[in-house]
Amino acid sequence: MSAKEIVTALAAVAAVCAISVPAMADDTGFAYMHDLRKEGGRTCFTDHYHYGNGSGATKAAAQKDAIGSWSSFTDFEYGSDWARFSRAASKAVSCTGSAGNVSCQIEARPCK
């Protein structure tokens, strides 16, 4: 097989993958090993929480960092459909420190 034929074959494979991958790109399927229930138009984990930690110069910055931590891990494990903290249930936020050095911890049940 020539180099040109290999490149053409690889391009064809890449095109097929690009078409078929997006259907599952936002949900890994791992969420379904947990118990789920409908809550206010969302599907939520019933008793499985995810956690995030963050720090910053202000409470708002530390909360944003903690939410990013929560979202990043949730996205990694379950996909971006589950990783929006704004849709999560049973949210709890705890912050300590003072201006210039604030730490926050959050927890919430993922929902989509």
Image (spheres, rainbow, N blue to C red):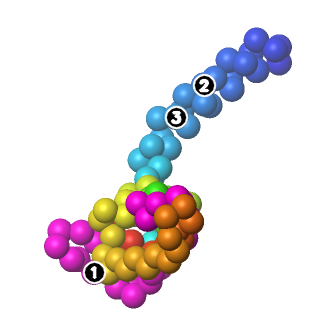
Q: In the image, which is nearer the foreground, mark 2 or mark 3?
A: 3
* Residue 101 horizontal/vertical position (percent): 56, 66
Q: Can you say whether 1 is above or below 59 in the image?
A: above
View extreme (bottom): residue? 47
Q: CA distance from mark 3 to mark 1?
A: 32 Å
Q: Which residues are magenta?
A: 33-60
Q: Amino acid at mark 1?
A: Arg
Could you tell me the amino acid type at mark 2? Ala
Q: Residues within 10 Å of mark 1 (few under 14, many from 20)?
A: some
Report which residue position mark 1 lands on: 37
Using the rendered view, name the quadrant where residue 49 is placed: bottom left
User: Mark 3 belongs to which amino acid?
Assistant: Ala
Circle 2 residue: 12
Q: Is residue 79 visible?
A: no
User: Is residue 98 depicted above or below 10 in this figure?
Assistant: below
Closer to us: 107 or 87: 107
Q: Which quadrant, please, contains the C terminus?
A: bottom left
Nearest to N terminus: mark 2 or mark 1? 2
Structural crowding at the residue carrying mark 2, measured as other residues with C-alpha within 10 Å and reported as few (<14), some (14–19) or many (≥20): few
Per the image, the residue denoted by label 3 is 18
Assess whether mark 1 and mark 2 are in contact (beta carbons under 8 angstroms).
no
Q: Of tags 3 and 1, which is closer to the observer?
A: 1
* Residue 45 at x, y percent in the picture: 37, 79
